[in-house]
Image (tube, helix red, strand yellow):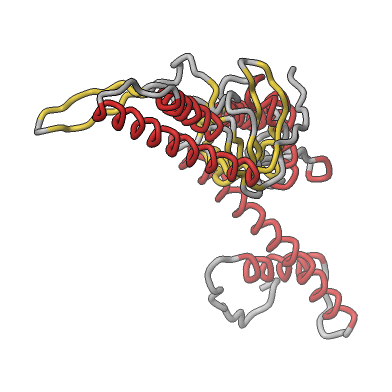
Amino acid sequence: MTAEKQARAASGWPMLFVTLAAYAVSIWGMIQGVIILATAEEAGVPAPVTGPVLLVGGIALLIVAIVINCGFFSLQPGQARVLVLFGNYVGTVHESGFYWANPFYARSLGSDGAGASIDVSLEEGSPSVKAAAAKALSTKVSLRARTLNGDRLKVNDKMGNPIEIATVVVWHVADTAKALFDVDNYPSYVAMQTETALRHVASIYAYDHMEDDDSSNRSITLRSNIEEVSASLKEELGRRLAPAGVSVDDARLTHLAYAPEIAQAMLRRQQAEAIIAARKKIVEGAVSMVDMALKELSDGGVVEFDEDRKAVMASNLMVVLCGESEAQPVLNTGSLYQ
């Protein structure tokens, strides 16, 4: 594992003036050398030594100025520059500003071409396929928060039911050395590990409670415990992305549903559970109302109830209170025993 080291770079402004002066002197030297050589040639006399010296010196100074010019770089807030000299990691510059460093520091890390992509385009009416080389990682790394909006995945939950799930992850690079040197391509690594972590978290939780679950001891589910599931996903991602120097700021589920092949069956099951729960509530309320009505009528002396009358009254009230349609009243002109 590579540990990040802090490095400092010199301010770029003094070197900028030195570079401009070197350009000016090199151009002046080359011009003066050419003039001296041309004058001597026209006069038909041997050229003085100063002519070739100024010309060669100006060319050499121009080459030096060009090399020095390659050492300038700037950093914006939220950016860092990893300094790599001939394959050796020197350190990381975090402060924003205009800097000059060794011009031989690498500006990008080489790639083995494993991520090469195929670009299909149309030119002059005929299709042509071009293989683009894998883009090398730049040594300038963004430390700003990034958002990964994952694709919908089809996985099995804890109960084996196929579900569709997706997540959005907010992350940032916390250790530039680990991000560039310990993994091949850290953005791709984050995407792959996010998918793996999401599949793992989805497989350890059930989508929803079953009807036979004990309400006093129900486990965490994907649908009912969003906060707990998100915390578990964030912890899983933090553990998986730590080797790449990536820190996870937040992880949330953006999509959760049963797979299409079982969605209708699960919908009917949920509807049945809702109907049963509603019926249970209605029956509980009706029983309490019937009990209250019988007590009020008996205690007030309005009606004297024996067991048969109580049964008939309770039956009638339950039909009225629990029925889905309006009850049609029937007038009984006789008595219960006639």
Where does the image place residue 104, in percent across and percent down from the top left? Answer: 58, 23
Quadrant in which the C terminus appears: bottom right
Q: Nearer the viewer, residue 135 or 20?
A: 20
Question: Which residue occupies the extreme right position in the image?
Answer: 299
Residue at 75% x, 43% y is 228
Q: Quadrant of residue 189?
A: top right
**Number of marks in the rendered image:** 0
Where does the image place residue 21, in percent across and percent down from the top left? Answer: 54, 42
Q: Is residue 128 visible?
A: yes
Quadrant in which the N terminus appears: top right
Q: Quadrant of residue 327?
A: bottom right
Where does the image place residue 212, in percent across and percent down from the top left? Answer: 71, 38
Where does the image place residue 192, in percent across and percent down from the top left? Answer: 56, 26
Residue at 34% x, 34% y is 35
Residue at 59% x, 40% y is 18
Question: Which residue occupies the extreme left position in the image?
Answer: 125
Q: Nearer the viewer, residue 40 or 208?
A: 40
Q: Quadrant of residue 38?
A: top left
User: In the drawing, does residue 68 fall left or right of residue 115?
Assistant: right
Q: Nearer the viewer, residue 137 or 328?
A: 137
Residue 319, above or below 295: above
Q: Nearer the viewer, residue 284 or 222?
A: 222
Q: Is residue 161 visible?
A: no
Residue at 62% x, 32% y is 198
